[in-house]
Image: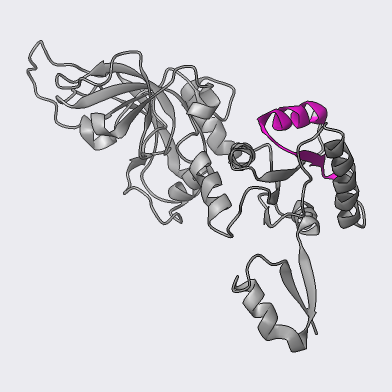
Amino acid sequence: MASLRLVALKALHRPSSLWKCNLSHSFLPRTHAFPTVRPFSAVMSPPSTAVVYDQHGPPDTVTRIVEVPPVELKATDVCVKMLAAPINPSDINRIEGVYPVRPQVPAVGGYEGVGEVHSLGSSVKDLSPGDWVIPSPPSSGTWQTYIVKDQSIWHKIDKGTPIEYAATITVNPLTALRMLEDFTSLKSGDCIVQNGATSIVGQCIIQLARYQGIHSINIIRDRPGSDEVKDKLKKLGADEVYTESQLEVKNVKALLIYLSVVLFILTSLGFCKANIPEPDLGFNCVGGNAASLVLKFLRMELVPFSDFPTALDKALGKLGSQPKQVIKF
């Protein structure tokens, strides 16, 4: 991963894993066989720099930086100057050849990002130079400085969107939404707990949960400036934010009960709107000790082996929302 970041930074001349650049281009096969004589009215993209791979394998081994010549825009093409593109785990998996959906090689890396319209084909009416756009649905080949693709690929967004959010808006928010909706039926007043809360997905979960009236308990790593991080997440809608060291206690359940009592008192006095119930759903985005901290918050019910049929019905949701079933042999 470190070597791939170095490759990216060499190409883009920016000190960040989120590529902020004067970016360029479309997929390499489009660069072949230019006509010898072009009409003066032809619209050409600028030369581009791209990170490509010709075979699957370790990203720091198989990727290389290439210069791509200008491309002539077709009538419905849009040339976009890329502004930022993330390095997602799925991007790494595509290069490695282990992701279920991946482009044929040779290919340009990257799957999402944000760019600015540079130039237009003669038939394009709904976009203008200077507009900010994202590929929608996400489209392979965003790790390049200019991209030339059909107008149907591009979706205009508000230029006031922070660039780091604009560059990741096509993958992370939808991931967060599926995480909230695919595992159990949450309703207003329910609660979730997650680690990795500072990630873009984690921040999206906080905001989507708050929008649906769902409480969130969030776990972050111990680091300098953790108080500022807590404030930021609470402004996004987090109910509670803890560092891992704060939860290194034997009985997190007792801590949660204590917090519920405090919140009940504050609610009664009009300082708070609602209690925080025990979480119905937990998200482990980190692993290791942080995963065990998530589990400590979840509702569990210890049941004897003789009650296995009933426990199974509860686990399958046949008896409504139930605590996690733990069989005692």
Residue 286 versus residue 104: which sits nearer the camera?
286
Q: Where is residue 245 in the image (x, y as percent from the top left)?
A: 87, 44
Can residue 284 be seen by looking at this rendering? yes
Tell me which colouring the rendered structure shows.
one colour
Residue 238: say if magenta.
yes
Q: Eyeballing the image, is 75 above or below 277?
A: above
Q: Can residue 245 be seen in this view?
A: no
User: What x and y, as percent, mark residue 318?
Assistant: 59, 74
Q: Please, is residue 119 above or below residue 198 in the view?
A: above
Name the residue rendered at 80%, 31% in the picture. Answer: 226
Relative depth, front residue between 252 and 100: 252
Residue 285 is a magenta residue: no
**Image location (x, y in percent) of residue 253:** 86, 56
Which residues are drawn in magenta? 226-244
- Residue at 15%, 22% (x, y): give it: 123
Near-viewer residue (262 or 7): 262
Q: Is residue 184 left or right of residue 284?
A: left
Count of number-bearing discs? 0
